[in-house]
């Protein structure tokens, strides 16, 4: 098992399915008020270069619920790369705490922190990937049907969320269709790695530009913001470019009453209409709920194996 949770591409399918199983047990325990103090006395450091609601609260609450503790580190406080090198930050944190979760712009920074830290490093989102989100999405899909029997469509920007869904599908042998504008495809590096993984897992991953073709008869339709954190200056141009990729009732009429997924935060009237996001087939708040339990299962897996 890898030391870190930086990308699902490093993980074996069986270990990812075990995380899903454990997340479901932890969720049932949580709902019935039963606490599992499996991380008693453990400390998580959390480093955020970008804003967060879900990732921050679920990691901090998760550690508290499992008997541990979390410390929030802000870039202006510790100055990775300005006040101190990433390597030294990783080395000293490794002497004090048990696990580091980081949300950074650069994916290379997380990879570097993971290499220099002797403790596990968890990717809480980079410009390239969002693996904790993909695991919560898998837990959510598993609630309504067997993910290996499902077809998932992703419509919109070929961003970090799309990239992690591609890698997750590639490891687990899932069926995934993507529709993104030709100018904003998923990462070429991610697609190349997914191609290698799919050869042994049997995953079927189809990348195209046509939203209607992508969603035809699928079980789940996923979308994400058109303007990711750090892209605010391109907002007007992106709103125009992605308009044909809106997930709305018309697009969903080409599916077999598909479930709707979104990692949140959502922009009603942009990537998704309000009637769809707040409608009866939306699982978006289940996804948010499952962030807590998927991550608690990841933390336990990394810290108690
Ligand atoms: N989905 C997600 O990662 O949300 P936050 O940016 O609020 O953490
Ligand atoms: N693609 C979005 C995901 C937010 C959780 C972003 O990077 O801002």
Image (tube, rainbow, N blue to C red):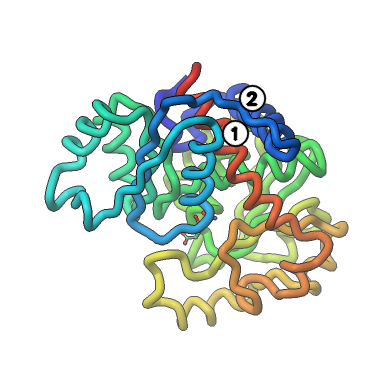
Residue 156 in the image: x percent, y percent? 59, 65
- Count the marks: how many? 2
Q: Does the beta carbon of the residue at mark 2 sit less than 8 Å from ligand 1?
A: no
* The residue at label 1 has a CB less than 8 Å from ligand 2: no
Where residue 256 appears, as percent x and y from the top left, is 87, 57
Q: Which mark is residue 18?
A: 2
Question: Residue 111 versus residue 70: which sits nearer the camera?
Answer: 70
Q: In this picture, is 27 found above or below 53?
A: above
User: Mark 1 falls on what kind of element?
Assistant: helix
Q: Is mark 2 on a helix, strand or loop?
A: helix
Q: Residue 5 carries which label?
A: none
Query: Is 41 left, or right, of 157 in this rendering?
Result: left
Looking at the image, which residue sits at the far top? 305
What residue is drawn where x is 64% and y is 24%? 18
The x, y position of residue 280, in whole percent, is 83, 62
Left or right of 206? Residue 95 is: left
Please identify, in this view, whether the residue under mark 1 or under mark 2 is nearer the observer: 2
Q: Which of marks 1 and 2 is nearer the N terminus?
A: 2
At a point 36% along the width and 52% down the height, the residue shown is: 48
Instruction: Measure how far apart labels 1 and 2 are at the Cα level.
Output: 20 Å
Residue matched to label 1: 198
Q: Is residue 290 left or right of residue 114?
A: right
Q: In the image, what residue occupies the spot 68% across and 37% down?
A: 30
Expressed as whole percent of the image width and height from the top left, the position of residue 55 reads 49, 50
The image quarter containing residue 285 is bottom right
For this rendering, which residue is in front, 253 or 36?
A: 36
Question: Residue 104, can we see it?
Answer: yes
């Amino acid at each position: 098992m890898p030391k870190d949770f930086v990308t699902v591409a490093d993980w074996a399918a069986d270990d990812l399915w075990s995380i899903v199983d454990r997340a479901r047990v932890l969720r049932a325990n949580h709902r019935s008020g039963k606490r599992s103090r499996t991380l008693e006395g453990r400390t998580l450091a959390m480093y955020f270069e970008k804003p967060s609601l879900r990732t921050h609260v679920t990691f901090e609450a998760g550690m508290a619920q499992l008997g541990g503790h979390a410390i929030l580190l802000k870039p202006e406080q510790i100055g990775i790369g300005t006040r101190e090198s990433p390597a030294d930050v990783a080395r000293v944190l490794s002497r004090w705490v048990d696990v580091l979760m980081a949300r950074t712009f650069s994916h290379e920074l997380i990879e570097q922190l993971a290499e220099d830290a002797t403790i596990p490093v968890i990717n809480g989102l980079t410009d390239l990937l969002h693996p904790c989100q993909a695991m919560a999405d898998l837990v959510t899909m598993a609630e309504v049907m067997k993910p290996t029997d499902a077809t998932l469509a992703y419509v919109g920007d070929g961003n970090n969320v799309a990239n992690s869904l591609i890698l997750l599908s590639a490891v687990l042998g899932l069926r995934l269709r993507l529709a993104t504008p030709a100018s904003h495809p998923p990462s070429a590096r991610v697609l190349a790695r997914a191609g290698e993984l799919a050869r042994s897992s049997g995953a079927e991953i189809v990348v195209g530009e046509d939203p209607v073709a992508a969603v035809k008869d699928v079980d789940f339709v996923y979308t994400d913001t058109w303007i990711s954190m750090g892209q605010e200056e391109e907002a007007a141009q992106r709103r125009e470019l992605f308009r044909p990729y809106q997930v709305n009732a018309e697009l969903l009429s080409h599916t077999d009453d598909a479930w709707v997924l979104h990692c949140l935060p959502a922009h009603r009237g942009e990537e998704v209409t309000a009637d769809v996001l707040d409608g009866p087939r939306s699982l978006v708040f289940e996804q948010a709920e499952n962030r807590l339990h998927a991550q608690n299962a990841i933390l336990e897996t990394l810290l108690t194996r």
